[in-house]
Structure formats: structure tokens, C-alpha cells
Image (tube, helix red, strand yellow):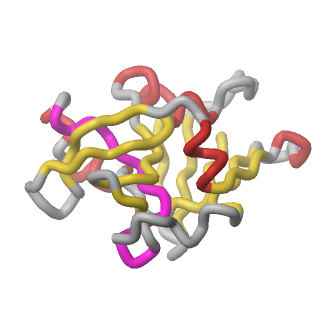
Amino acid sequence: MSSQAPDAGRTVLTITLPGDAALERRYTLDELAALPHSTLRSPMPDERHIHEWLGVRLSTLLEGIDRDGAKRLRIEALNDYSALIPLSDLDAYEPILAYRRDGQSLGIAERGPLFVIYPMVDYPELRTQLYFNRTVWQVSRITLE
């Protein structure tokens, strides 16, 4: 893993609302790192080793956005994988959009630069395929649906 992220000045995340392009938000890694952050401990979906993750709560990214009528987030990855996360998960588990693992920035080869992480150490019941599917790596876009 590299200590300096190559994507620091490039847009790495776009948040969109269908039908309202004026509310589209774009973030660089530097801009994400400037937001209030959270740390949590969780394994990667395919391993047992516990990592320390640093990132922004998904709920923080949605602050100031009218969520009336929305029920979920569509999280899209660079490889066209997508997963649906119910908005109720944001309050119940406070998942984060991580940009550092064990103190290191995440390059694309390390499944970065952004990774949705749930607090699976605090909530062992999340260690199921349903939540592993919601643990999306190489996140590039979030759409409120």
C-alpha cells in the first residue's frame, strides 16, 4: 500500500440524486479526508484479520441532502459492481466510506481508493453474505434512491 494516494487531487467519488443534477456532489480524496472522520475495526470480507479503517460515515456524506422518499443507496464500483444499502443501515450500524486501512491509503490494486466498511467487530451478526455484499470496494459513485 502506498502512503501517498495517487488520486489525492482527482475526483474519486460522485454522489447523485436521480433527476436533480444540481445536487450532484464530487469529492477528491483530500476533500473526503477534510470531512469529519470515523475509525472502526473490521475484517476484509474474505479474511479473518482485523484491520483499522479510517473514513467518512455514509450519513455524513448525505448531510444537507433531502432524503424524503429515499429508501436506499446504490453504491457503484469502478468495475461496475453495485450494491444496495438501505438507509436504515446508516443509523443502525454507521458504515463508513474508508480511504485508509491500517494507516495506509488504498490504491486501486488494494481495492481502493474507497471501500464501504461495516463495523463487523462491534456487530458480529453482520458477518453474513448479505453484509459482505454491501461491503463494496473501489467505490466511485453513490446514488440516493
Note whether 114 is above or below 18 in the view shown. below
Position of residue 8 relative to residue 117, above or below, is below
Left or right of 71? Residue 120 is left
* Image point (90%, 43%), residue name: 22
Question: Could you tell me which quadrant the N terminus lies in?
Answer: bottom left
Residue 43 drawn at (x, y percent): 19, 51
Q: Quadrant of residue 91?
A: top left
Q: Which residues are magenta?
A: 108-121
Name above or below for residue 123 compared with residue 108: above
- Tell me: residue 7, above or below residue 125: below
Which sits in the foreground, 71 or 122?
122
Identified at 74% across, 48% down, the residue is 16
**Residue 141 pos. (x, y %):** 62, 57
Residue at the farthest right position: 22
For the point 48% across and 66% down, the residue is 4
> Which corner quadrant of the image does residue 73 belong to?
top right
Horizontal and vertical percent position of residue 20: 87, 43
Picture quarter with the C terminus: top right
Magenta stretch contains residue 112: yes
Write the residue at 32% across / 40% down. Answer: 118
Front-lying residue, 140 or 134: 140
The percent position of residue 98, horizontal first and vertical second, equals 43, 48
Would residue 13 be counted in the magenta stretch? no
